[in-house]
Amino acid sequence: MRTSLLRSMESVRRSGSGSVPGQLLRRSFVFSASTPQRKVAILGAAGGIGQPLSLLMKLNPLVTHLSLYDIAGTPGVAADVSHINTPAEVKGFATEEQLGQALEGADIVIIPAGVPRKPGMTRDDLFNINAGIVKSLCTAIAKYCPHAIVNMISNPVNSTVPIASEVFKKAGTYDEKKLFGVTTLDVVRAKTFYAAKAKVPVAEVNVPVVGGHAGITILPLFSQATPATNALGDEDIKALTKRTQDGGTEVVEAKAGKGSATLSMAYAGAVFADACLKGLNGVPDIVECSFVQSTVTELPFFASKVRLGKNGVEEVLGLGSLSEFEKAGLESLKPELKSSIEKGIKFAQEN
Ligand SMILES: NC(=O)C1=CN([C@@H]2O[C@H](COP(=O)(O)OP(=O)(O)OC[C@H]3O[C@@H](n4cnc5c(N)ncnc54)[C@H](O)[C@@H]3O)[C@@H](O)[C@H]2O)C=CC1
Ligand SMILES: O=C([O-])CC(=O)C(=O)O
């Protein structure tokens, strides 16, 4: 699940020779000779998430064109990132008039545009501002790159993904295989917290996280965590679950009014976009958790493991066997997730 970049850096470290940028560049040229042209557009590229995400996508050897769009501050970010000596060609787009150009030909559109939380707020408190932003950006996606894969980061993800689906339906461009709510940060956190508690190497850890992306709708399945351990009791699992569910709030409180997770989110967004790129390029067995249209439960959207392929979602995987604690968590998340989904759909239908 690690990015090509991280793998490249690791192999450089292991070989103990050569500068990291030099190695990456040589690798990138090898990649670009055998892999397709891929344009990635980031909407909200000058923000707290957007900037480090732009950096990480510039370092991704699968990206040939990187399109950075924001309503404020894009030229500086684009100029800065464009000086990095990797092959992706960077272009910045700063006004709404340029949004079409930013999107045209995009294979993947990543959306971290919108306001973040402050202490005391829930993700749903962002709905009033972010719903409109997401709606207008998705309207442009439907017009300028209707076949692109969309990675939705803007919160509340439990509502913004349904909003996007309705906008695309209205435009006649909806393809449920191409719309993803990015829940990778929940997986990243679950892995980190589990590894520390179970005292296993974090690089080997995998933990599926299902449900949605807010509070109790985030359901980590520690009973399926690998490497398995019997060192953790019920209380440990409860505490790990709660910490994963509250991970975003932990960062919001630590930042004390200066926003929410940006660096870990940029990492998670880059991991997920890299997985989408690999899927598009035909790499087999690319599986990530994501909030997608789903029949895994009775809810129309649900996060679970998804196999990625040339057309986006190749297969939405089932939940596997759950512990009694997870079964109870699944039942108690459903009402909140249902109402967040319905809120998004209603907004898009009425506006
Ligand atoms: N899915 C997830 O796991 C996570 C989601 N988030 C969400 O990501 C969003 C962004 O967070 P940050 O980057 O920290 O916020 P930020 O405020 O630092 O950056 C947001 C950027 O969006 C831009 N923007 C606003 N309206 C726009 C529009 N119409 N078109 C293009 N750009 C526009 C702003 O100019 C700004 O540069 C928030 O909604 C936050 O809650 C944050 C962390 C994790
Ligand atoms: O908590 C927030 O507002 C941002 C977010 O979604 C996360 O960090 O998981």
Image (tube, helix red, strand yellow):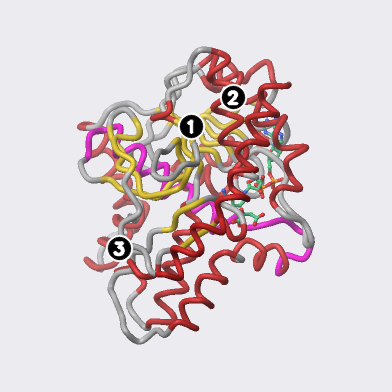
- Disc 2 crowd rating (10 Å Cα; few below 14, some 14-19, many 20+) is many
Q: Which residue is mark 3?
A: 10
Q: Are marks 1 and 2 in contact (CB under 8 Å)?
A: yes
Q: CA distance from mark 3 to mark 2?
A: 37 Å
Mark sitting earlier along the chain (1/2): 2
Residue extent of the magenta highlight: 254-283
Q: Quadrant of the N terminus?
A: bottom left
- What x and y, as percent, mark residue 134? 65, 31
User: Who is closer to the viewer here, 61 or 42?
Assistant: 42
Q: Quadrant of the C terminus?
A: top right
- What x and y, as percent, mark residue 208? 38, 59
Residue at (29% x, 75% y) in the render: 228
87 above or below 305? above
Mark sitting earlier along the chain (3/2): 3
**Disc 3 or disc 1, which is closer to the eye?**
1
Q: Amino acid at mark 2?
A: Cys
Q: CA distance from mark 3 to mark 1?
A: 29 Å
Splitting the image into four quadrants, where does ligand 1 fall?
A: top right
77 above or below 146? below
Residue at (37% x, 43% y) in the render: 274
Q: Which residue is mark 2?
A: 138
Mark sitting earlier along the chain (3/1): 3
Q: Amino acid at mark 1?
A: Val
Q: Amino acid at mark 3?
A: Glu
